Amino acid sequence: MLRPEIPIEGEMQIAWAAIGSRRLDALLAITRLLKFPCPRRLRADLRLICRALCTDKNEFVRVQALEILEQVGNQQDTFAIVERLGDESWIVQVTAADALGEIRTQRAYRALHRSLSDPTDFVRRHVAGAMGRYRRKDLIPVLESL
């Protein structure tokens, strides 16, 4: 069975959107392309771009970059995602927590544990949900105390 390749027009959308200040458009195009099988090198390049865009001034760009890292990220992306747990935007914090719940590294777990004391209730709930994906027995008393 033939596997669909990334359509060339999708690659062109990314290139054109990235040229200008249309970073969000580029990330949305990348999200659509991830529905197709991608070569490993392309995924590595996407991860590198998204790690850089995690610090963008636009919170929606940061959110979209984190969502892509949630799909294709690995241990190497943990640091960039952990930094976003302290973001000024609660939307970015929630998205970072969800991404760390998918990546499931020890560093991510420790960062999520620290974020359980976030002043925003909604962020704490997402952090607790992300920690629940780790399925650790020592986590039960921590989550019950919330």
Image (cartoon, rainbow, N blue to C red):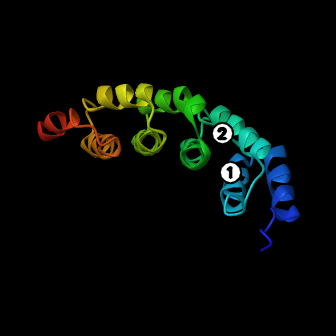
Q: Is residue 83 above or below residue 89?
A: above
User: Which quadrant, please, contains the N terminus?
Assistant: bottom right
Q: Secondary structure at mark 1?
A: helix
Q: Within 10 angstroms of label 1, few (less than 14), some, or many (20 or more) residues?
A: many
On the picture, is 17 further left or further right than 92? right
> Which residue is situated farthest in the front direction here?
1
User: Can the viewer see residue 20 in this picture?
Assistant: no
Expressed as whole percent of the image width and height from the top left, the position of residue 80 reads 56, 29
Towards the viewer: 106 or 6: 106
Q: Which residue is mark 2?
A: 50
Residue at coordinates 21% horizontally, 32% vertically from top-left? 138
| Residue 12 against residue 103 in the figure, above or below | below
* Residue at mark 1 to residue at mark 2: CA–CA distance: 8 Å
Residue 38 badge:
none
x%, y% of residue 100? 45, 38
Circle 1: residue type: Leu
Q: Is residue 102 visible?
A: yes
- Tell me the residue that label 1 is attached to: 27
Which amino acid, mark 2?
Answer: Cys
> Which residue does the image show at 54% across and 42% down from the upper left?
59
